[in-house]
Amino acid sequence: MKTLLEKYRIPTYLFVLILGAVWTWLSAVPAGSTSAGEIPAPQEGFSAPDFSLRSLDGDTVTLSELRGQPVLINLWTSWCAPCRAEMPAMQRIHEKYRERGFVILAVNATNQDSPNSAAAFVAEHGLTFPILLDVDGSVSEHYHLRSLPTSFFVNSQGIIKEVVIGGPMSEALLQTRVDNLLAEAP
């Protein structure tokens, strides 16, 4: 004599399978409601999201206008200890590679900092690469900033080759990454 469980095992399995199929069909995302091919967060192998920001000098810098040059996008604040620690190495790398077309864009997360604090930091460290002010946090949002500093190494075609979250980055790490970007440039 079969137990109740044995008697209804197959119908129970079929019911669960059908219920799962119905749930999958009902919860599917409708066509056209996705991000239209955009990735949820900038990552290696994908295009770096474009942006235009004002610099401390008052110039407007647009990432897409730098196409053809390798770029380091570094998101930072003046109060971030690892950010402070890696900036001197970034300055030395800038001085070493700028003649070869390498560009550093230091994007200050000004919505978490202030223009005055950023300017004082730049003066204190003698930084000569562009310091951009993300006043409304739009670049931090597009780049899904979760930790300071965060750096994106972008090749001359505008593709992110590497993302480094946290820091400080050593000068040796920076040099290796920049050498790699320059080696693949046409």
Image (spheres, rainbow, N blue to C red):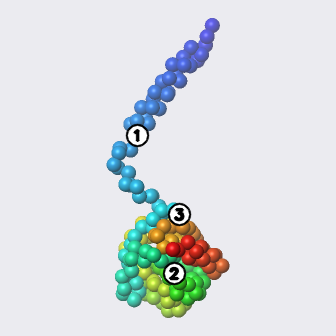
Numbered mark located on residue 44 in the image: 3
Label 1: how many Cα within 10 Å (few below 14, some 14–19, many 20+): few
Name the residue located 46 percent from the left edge and 27 percent from the top edge: 18
The residue that disc 1 covers is 27
Mark 3 or mark 2, whichever is nearer to me: 2
Which secondary structure lies at badge 3?
Answer: loop
Percent of width and height locating residue 54: 37, 81
Q: Earlier in the sequence, mark 1 or mark 3?
A: 1
Percent of width and height locating residue 75: 49, 75
Name the residue located 55 percent from the left edge and 88 percent from the top edge: 95
Name which residue type carries label 2: Phe
Name which residue type carries label 3: Glu
Mark 2 or mark 1, whichever is nearer to me: 2
Q: Is residue 102 left or right of residue 49?
A: right
Q: Residue furthest front?
A: 186
Numbered mark located on residue 102 in the image: 2
Tell me if I can see residue 40 in this picture: yes
Q: Earlier in the sequence, mark 2 or mark 1?
A: 1
Tags 3 and 2 touching, CB below 8 Å: no
Q: Quadrant of the N terminus?
A: top right
Q: Is residue 12 left or right of residue 134?
A: right
Spatial CA distance of label 1 from label 3 is 30 Å
Name the residue located 45 percent from the left edge and 32 percent from the top edge: 21
Name which residue type carries label 1: Ser
Q: Residue furthest top?
A: 1
Tell me if I can see residue 148 in this picture: no
Percent of width and height locating residue 110: 43, 78
